Each structure stands twice: as C-alpha cells, then as structure tokens.
Image: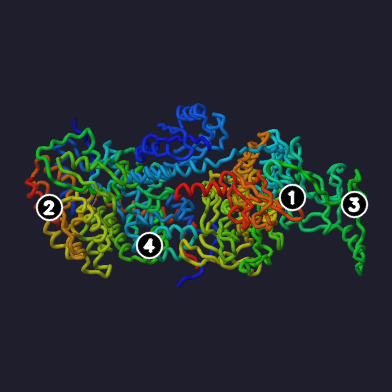
Amino acid sequence: MAVSYAYYPGCTLKTSAREFDESTLKVCKAAGIELTELADWNCCGASSAHSVSPLLGLSLPARDLQTAEALGKPVAVACAMCFHRLKHASHALGDAAKLKQVNQVLGKEFRNTVKVEHLLTILGSNGSSYQVTKKLEGLKAASYYGCVLVRPKEVMELDDEDNPQLMDRIVASLGAETVEWDFKTECCGASLPLSKPEVVVNLSHKILRQARQRGAECVVVACPMCHSNLDIRQKAMKAAYPGFQEMPVYYFTQLMGLAMGFSAAEMHIDKHLTDGLSLLKSKGFI
Amino acid sequence: MINTVTILPAAKNDLRSFVEKTSGQKLLRCYQCGKCTAGCPTAYLWDLTPRQVMRAVQLGLKEELMRTHSYWLCVFCQTCSARCPQEIDIAAVMDSLRHLAILEKRAPAEKEVALFHRHFLRLVHRFGKVWEVGLGGLYNLTSGHPLANTSLLPAMFARGKLPLLPHTTHNMEEIRNIFKRAEELERKSAGPETGRKA
Amino acid sequence: MPRVGVFLCHCGTNIAGVVDIPTVAEAVKQFPGVVYVDDNKFSCSEPGQAAIRQSIIDNGLDRVVISACSPRMHEITFRKAVSAAGLNPYLMEIANIREHCSWVHSDNKEAATEKAIELVKMAVAKVSLHQELFRKRISMEKKALVIGGGIAGIQAALDIANAGHQVILVEREPTIGGRMAQLDKTFPTLDCSACILSPKMVDVSQHPNIRLLTYSEVEKVQGFVGNFEVEIRQRARYVNHTTCTGCGICWQKCPEKVPGEFEEGTGQRTSVYIPFPQAVPSKPVIDTVSCRYFKYLDFIDKKMEGKKPPPCRICEKLCPPQAIDWEQKDEIIRETVGAIVVATGFKTFDHSVYGEYGGGRIPDVITSLQLERLMNASGPTLGEVVRPSDGTHPKTVVFLSCVGSRDEAKGRPYCSKICCMYMAKQALMLKEHDPGVQSYIFYIDIRAGGKDFEEFTRRAQEEFGVLYLRGRVSKIYQDDKKLMVCGEDSLIGRPVEIAADMVVLATGVEPSEGAAKVAQTLNISYDTYGFMVEAHPKLRPVETNTDGILVAGACVGPRDIPDSVAHGGAAAAKVIGLLSQDTLTTEPLTAAIDASRCTGCLLCSQICPFQAIDMVPANGKSIAVVNEGLCKGCGLCVAACRSTAPSLKGYTDAQILSEVLALCP
C-alpha cells in the first residue's frame, strides 16, 4: 500500500544538495512511498530566524505546516535542519498562547494537527519495503546524524540523542557494515561556514578523524548542512591538518539507491566535492 | 579591566526577567556545574563560557554580557540543553540573548555571524527561500571578506550546486506579512525589560 | 610435669595444603610434656570441638595447645571447648600456623612445615607454665549519668529511662533544651524547633526514672564501668524550687535588666530569671553577678566606698510562697552510676577575631544564632527581624559562610557541617517573613549531604530567589546606613560588592565552654579543638576508650539535630546494654603488681592509658595497685617499670622466656 506524504524538500535540496533531493525522490518512489512536493513552500527559517526573532522562527515553518494541514497529509522532510524547525514549531505551538500569536502573524488559521516525519523514520520503519538488489557488502560506513536531527529528543521524537540507530539500521540493511563510534551527534559547525569557516574545518575534521580511526571508509549523513560541512571543507582540512585523509560523504538515500539498483549517475555520486566514486568502484558497486 | 560588580536584588534584574520570559527557562535552576561548557563545540571561542553566560544572567550583568561574543557563537546544536542536569534549555537562553541584542539594536560583537543571519533572512523576506549565490555574494560584499569561500565556487558551479537564479515562493505577500507582523508583535510584547539604560 | 595435648587443625587445605601435618604430628610427640597429639580437618567445627573435649577427658590432659588459625579468630571458641572438658580455659594456648605460616609461606612447603613445628614447640613450652586464671565479677550500679541537657542528652536520658533504668541528667544552665531551644525553625522540614523539643523537655521533667539536676556541674568522677563515683555541684539558685510555684511574679517585677545569654545578646533578662518561657524546670534562679541585693551585700562585705546600692529584695517581698532563699548554698551531690553519657554540645565561634568583618563592632553584623532569636516568635522582637542599630527591617541581607570554619588562619580547619543548611533555611525564612527581602549567601561549597538537604538548598535558590555567590568575603564596611560587602563571584570571576542592610555571619561550631575540663574529669580523650574522641570514628562512634563512658551529639564534632538525636539514642542503647547486666565479667589477663618490688615511683600510674593504676598507702609509702575493672592488659606498665614490679597474667616474663628458649635452646 502506497503511503502518501506532503514532501518538504527545503531550500538547499533544490540547490547545493540536489543529489539528496533526487536520490530521495527516486528511492521513495521505488519503495512505494508517495511524495508530493508541498505547494508553494517557503524557507523554514533555518538557524537564522529563531536566532533573531523567536516569533519569526515559529511563523515561517508554521506557514508550511498549515499548507500541509489543509491538504490533510503528513509532512515528509529530508533536510535535518528543516525537520528540526518544523518539529520544533509544531511542538512549541502546543502552547495555545503561542499558537494564537502565530496565527495572528500568518493571517490564517493553523490548528497544529499535522504530523511531521523525517525520511529516516519513514524509510527505516517496518512499513517501508525497499528491495535491496545489490548488497553493499564490504563497505564500512559511519552513520553521522548531526545535532539537530535528534535534539531535543522529546521534541524530535526520532532516536537517542547520543547513540541513535535509525540510520545505522538502514545502512546495515543495504549490506554495508556500520562502525561503532562516538561522534554520531557531535556538532560539525552548523551555520558557521560563511562567517567562521575555520571553526567548521576544526569541528568537521574531528568528526572525520574519529570515523577514520574507528575503521570507517565513508560517512553517511541525513543533513545537507552536515554534508556540506563535511564534504566541501576537506581540502581545507588537508591544509590545516597534515596527514588528514579524504573520506567520501554520502547521503543515506544515495547508498540506498545504489543498493536498490540505481546507477551512480542516477544517485549523483559525482556531485560531491570529495570524490565519492573511487571508493564505490574499488568495492565493485559501480 | 575588571570592574567591581554591584549586585542588585533579583527584583531589579531585568536581564533575567527578559530571558526567563522569552526562553521559558528558569535561570535560577542553574547550579553552575559547567557541563554546558564542557560539551559546547564552540566554547573555546567564547569570552564568557556558556556557564558564565548563565551566571551573568543570574547576576543581571546585562551590559557586560551583551558586549560578549559568546552568545553569537552559539550554533544551536543544543548539546548543552540535552545534557543539562537541571534540565535548562541553555540554547534557548542563547536565542533570547541574541533576540535581546537585536531588539535593543546593539552592535554585535560577532558582526559576521549577525550579518549572516541578517542576509539570510533578507533573502527569505525577498524570495521566500534561500538563494545561496545571493547569500554568499551579499555576505562577501558587506562583511569585508570579499573573497571568503570563493575558492570553493568553481567546483560548486561545475557540479550544478549553485544555481545562479533564486527559487521563489509565489505568494510573497504572505511571506512579507509574516515578517512584518512578527516584528510588530514582538516589539509590542517586548516589555519593560528591554531597552538600554544609562 | 604437665600433661599437654596438641591439636593440629588442617583448616581444610588452608593449612594442610602447605604444612605437612603428619610430619608436624610426629615431631610434636617428642616435645617435653606432650602426651597426646591429634589432628582434625576443622578443629573449630562442632565435631572438631567435641574431639578436643573428649581427648582432654580420656587422656587426663591438663594443658592444651591448639595449632590452628589466629587467636583473633577462634580463641574464644577454643577456650569454651577446653572449659567444657572441665579445664580452666586459660590453660590453653594457640599456635597460629595459618596466618603466621601456611598463608604466608605457601611457596615453600618444607620451610612452612618446619616453622609450624617451631611455633607449636613455643606454644607447648609456654602453656606448660600457664596458671589457672579466673574472671572476676564486678557489680553493676543500674543507674546512668547523662552530662548535658541538649537534644542529644535529652534523647539519651529518655531512652535509658524508658528502658527502666535510673538516670541523673546534669545540665549546667538553669534549663535543659540546649542549642535546639534557641532555634526558630529546623531544616529541611521547617518544623518549629521549640514545638518538637519542648514535649521532650517536659517528658524529662516528669519521668519517674529521671533525676534532673539543672544549674549543676559534674566535679569529680572516680571508679570504673559499673561503679563510677560521681560528685555533682548543684549551684545555689537562691530560690527554693520545692516551694516555688513558677508563678513568674519575681522575674516580672525584678528591676535589674542584663543582656540575656539565651537571646545571644539580642534581648534582655532580669536578674531573677528563667531563660525562656518553655524552660524546664520553669522555676527561676538568681544571677548573683547582676542582682542588686547581692551587689549590696558585696558592698557591705567589702566595705566599699561611694554610693551604697539599694538592698532591693523586691522578689522576696513579692514572692507568694516565700521561695526566695538568700542563704542557699551550693550543694554537693554524690551518686554511684554504672555508665556515663557525655553530651556537652557545642557553642558557636567567636567572630571578634575577624577584624575585616568588623570584629563584632558593627551592630548590624550579627551571628546566625542571633538571627535565630530575632526570627523566633518568642524571641526579643517577637519574631520581627530588625536591625539592631535602628530597629528598621532589613531588605538586603548577606550571609557569610565559614566564619570560623575551614579557616586554617583562625585555627579552625574543619567544616562545621550545619552552616550551609541553616543559612539556606534562614535565607528562605527571611523571605517568608518579608517577601521584600533579598538574601545573598557567600559560600565556598554548598555542603548539603543529607536527606532532602540538596533539594532544600535548591528550593531556597529557585523558589525563594536566594542568590548564592561563590567566594569568601574580604571586608565589610559601613557606608552611611548600608553595609558594603566586598567579595568575589568566583563563578564569573569578578569582584562584587553588595550594599546590605544586615550581614549574618555563619559562625562555626566548636565544643562548649569547658568541654576539655569535662573530658579531663572523666579521663577521656579530646582533640586539639576540645571535641571528644570516639573509640573508633566508624565502628565505635559512641564509645570512648574508657569502658562505660559514652559520647553523644555535637561534643564529638559538628552535628545537626537528627544526627545528634540518633547519636544520643545510640549512646543510650550502649548504656542499656551495660545496665541490663547484673554484674560485669572482667578478663583475667590483667597486670598485677608485686608490692614488695614497687618503689612507688608513679611511672606506671602516669603512663597507664586506662587510668587503671591507683596509688595506695602501704607501710609508710605509696605503692601501685591495679584496678582490674579498668586494666586492659596492654602491658605498658610492665615495660615501663624499672623494678619489674608489674607482670601481665598469662604473659609473664617466665612464659615469654620459655618460648624464646624453646626456639633457641
């Protein structure tokens, strides 16, 4: 039975994280999950809106949620930051006074009845049925969740805050081996790349170094911001930390796609700044 | 220079009242264990550590705190909030402090960080969505770092990661109204705690 | 020639796994006097003991060596076994071939076997010289003395009395109740202190088994457990308590007013007074220092110059039952008691040595105990907290912790334990009294390790807005009507200054005035600060090194109310255990002094840690005599005496030498 969602891609999935968007859509379709892009969606406000104005930080995602509510469909989110903001809004608006304020700002009635789910939950749940045709045997991957996907636990309702397992289970189901490591939810530098690139390089490097130390050959993510920080800063890491070895960073949907029989081109593996093809080739997956 | 701080009674601590009201957190619960600082990924850059920021709010050291870089360097990873033994959402406190600084039109100690947020929202206000090329361009033009991150551009463009034109939300009137009304409402409800005193 | 039987224990494989028992048995047979050798898997087991009993009877043994584990483990067991066979239990010796041999020489079995043989050889030699020794029974006076009528002493007295024993409760002040009576509320439950204490005080006064002696002090203690001879001085009260009805006319009409001790100087009392309304006994005493009539008598006596004071005597004139008795004298009360509980309590540190806090000269810098009186509804201000200087209500109150605690420079390195909690309570109560009060507490650490204590200090901060500042205050100075308090908030690393209306010093805990003297009178140990020393800080927390003398409450160290009550109860349990015996049995392994050799030099008496040696006159000189009730058989006197007058029963020189000679003939 096909499950139907209002799909909220978020801004970056249409630009710098296109591969996440496209792999998500293909994988979901093949897995029988119906994603219909939310009509005329707007930015969730990301890390900026709430930093500057709490009310704006609630109102921007509330507009999107209201659209979905009107459709009567639950919202599926791919981007971890968008998921965080939408979930946070829906949790915070449990407060009637805040909801009233937000409705004043929106100029329409939002009842806060819509359910928000991340694709990790949707694809990783028992109900989803994706067919693995090409096992990624021998690939050692570190699942990296980042901060906003899981924190705070009681609001995100996704997984454990320090040792989440959702993505690990999906990656393992593809035949790959997931490594045990300690930095699954450490911060990568988040929204600082423009203003403080050196902080991002420092923090992201720590994450990749631990992944390597614990035997991983690649890192798997579910967040465009994490992906960007971990992927595009590796040249800078090499310059700052001699001996650093580059490591491919994949979206979990990309690995799913490969295991489900899609080609590397269909999964846009070539869109990363850090080479993601060689490893897959050396393992004979492509 | 270290000035002697005159400690005021709690009733005159406007800073704490504002932070408690906007963040919904009880600041007196903080018993200064330092676990927030210990887990903060960027604390090594903060002039007052996260624990000290909490302390400054408890003591009502508003001017001193507002001048710091600290709360601008919070990336809202919420590690502090998740691990706080007293269950204080410390990240929400940092949000409140940024919000206060903006309401009071203070010059941010971390002007690049503030600039990023400002440009980000300017674009959302204009297009309803973020336009990365525009954000980078605006930031580089105004931050005094015209070449920031430009070395990454060729590779990004080559991979089609940076469309030159913005995506837009169609109903922009609605988006602009959201910005307008949110600001109006917030100013209106800001209360007597905000505002800079001589 | 004695007939010695040797019993070799295998202790499973503990001994037999290392020591070759058959070889030992073979060797032992050759030792002089040995007529019987046997071995057993477990000598301490019931069949093992039965075998020992039977062999003694069957073989007519009159000396026994048990070659087994340490005497610390089973000496009593084997003495019983020997005794059951009709032999004097002290005709037995243990050769420790486990702890001293098999366990430590498991790597060399041959040498271990050889050593075991030698250990048994020594024991055989020694036991041959053993004499029959007999335990003595001493009588037990079924009465206890409790010194100190604070909460610990009250609890101990009530518990002992309720168990059916007579108790004499001696209190120096005119009333019992102690420090707890001065307190307003108690942490962390905020019970009214007087409300929970005064029923116990009344219980004491009405208990048929308790003889209450207030305004009294113990002057002399002699004797030993079961039979302490005690002298108590009942100070003259100049009021006949038999006829006095406690009507109160005297203290209401007395014209002379002096600062009240009970009020910590925050209020006044008259010269004839009871310290506080709920005092027990509720009958007054006359303070001769301030009483006008006594001043008058003094003036006449000493033929002083100048204006003659009036011979007041108003109390006498007004007293309905004519209970005022100017002729009353101190009275010495002699009692014999079986056990003594010392519960002399504590006083608070004198903060005048802290010049930086005003040295006691700034009127609005008060102590925590003074604040208790100000907060107390029956205190001098009827519960209104006001500044001593001008009677106004303070709005900003600063507490300083560790005044006279954790301060090496002031000779008080220890933590007073109760201050963190009472400060939290007082700050919280100030807010209850007046919601407009803001309290600050300067602290080094918040020590709240007790049931519901941490929650309480959190509540003071979170619900009552008490602001804690981590750091010690450096100075307090007066600025117009304010007190400027200069400290640091070490959490943010800034010097801070608070303009306060009142400052409360959390003065630390130290032993009561004269505690050391009480300890000396009782011959029990006390530490540098004057706190009583327990026999063991963990395992014998209410005992002292003197049998029959127990300690309870804050005289041992800083203690809060629940701990003092528990401690008092624990001391009482020990007393009840003692008094439940009709007689006490003493160990016969004590020192004995050969009077013919004693020169009366007193050395043994001086070094004896148990004060067990008395000097008695004999043939025109003083000679030492051992009090077997007190002697613990430590042997110090034996080692110290230059004329070898003392010897230790069971360990005589001849016995020790025989062991040496057995080893190196």
What numbered label is drawn on residue C327? Answer: 3
- Whole-percent x, y for residue A244 in the image: 18, 60
Which label sits in the foreground, 3 or 4?
A: 3
Q: Is residue B8 above or below residue C341?
A: below
Relative horizontal placement of residue A51, taking residue C512 as reference (left or right): left
Q: CA distance from mark 2 to mark 1?
A: 92 Å
Residue type indicated by callout 3: Glu
| Both labels 2 and 1 in a single chain | no
Q: Give the crowd class for mark 3: few <14, some 14-19, many >=20 residues within 10 Å.
A: few
Mark 4 = which residue?
B70
- Whole-percent x, y for residue A10 in the image: 23, 49
Q: Give the crowd class for mark 1: few <14, some 14-19, many >=20 residues within 10 Å.
A: many
Residue type indicated by callout 4: Ser
Mark 1 = which residue?
C218
- Whole-percent x, y for residue B119 in the image: 28, 61
Q: Chain of mark 1?
A: C
B195 or C92, which lies in front? C92
- Whole-percent x, y for residue C108 in the image: 33, 46
Which label sits in the foreground, 4 or 2?
A: 2
Residue farthest toward the front in the current orientation of the protein? C1
Residue type indicated by callout 1: Val
First-in-chain label (3 vs 1): 1
Colouring method of the image: rainbow
